[in-house]
Image: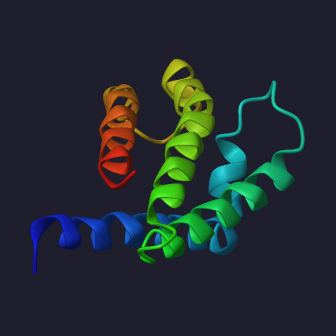
Amino acid sequence: MKLKFILLLVFALLFILGGSNHFLNPQIYLSIMPPYLPWHSQLVFISGIAELLLGFTLLIPTTRKVSARGLIALLIAIFPANLHMALHSELYPILASLLWLRLPLQALLIAWAYWYA
């Protein structure tokens, strides 16, 4: 198997599992929603559906480019929640340094998605 295809499977699985987790453990995602955003439950639901849908359609060659672009948009859309966590690390049971490290990881994930776009 080619490395790019193996990494595609890993990337898609990351979003499929993450999207599934929105429904298995919604409280985690609700707890990281920035207070300035409305409709927390609905946004967690929508982002879970988006992760599942984009993760699965990333595996289909004819929808791969559109899905990768959708994942880029999704990663940009969820960045405020990650930034909120880093800025308010005292609210979360995660080391502050890990929350700050997660921010540049978003750029890496966007680059990874762009590789398939």
Q: Residue 91 versus residue 114: which sits nearer the camera?
A: 114
Nearer to the camera, 68 or 25:
68
On the rendered structure, is 110 left or right of 79? left
Quarter of the image containing the N terminus? Answer: bottom left
Write the residue at 46% across / 54% down: 68
Q: Position of residue 56 (x, y in %)?
A: 51, 75
Rendering quarter of residue 78 = top right
Which residue is situated farthest in the bottom direction here?
Answer: 1
> Which residue is the extreme one toward the front?
62
Would residue 72 appear left or right of 111 to someone viewing this image? Answer: right
Q: Residue 88: which quarter of the image?
A: top right
> In the depicted view, which residue is nearer to us: 117 or 39?
117
| Residue at the extreme right of the image, as rendered | 39
Q: As displayed, is residue 105 above or below residue 26?
A: above
- Residue at point 53%, 33% (across, down): 82
Figure label count? 0
Q: How is the image coloured?
A: rainbow
Q: Residue at x 39, y 72 (%)?
A: 13
Residue 77 image offset from top left, x and y in percent: 63, 36
- Rendered view: 107 above or below 68: above
- Does residue 55 appear to the left or right of 45 in the view shown? left
Q: Residue at x 37, y 25 (%)?
A: 100
Q: Position of residue 58 (x, y in %)?
A: 45, 68
Residue 91 in percent (x, y) is at: 59, 31
Q: Quadrant location of residue 33? A: top right
Image position of 73 (left or right of 103)? right
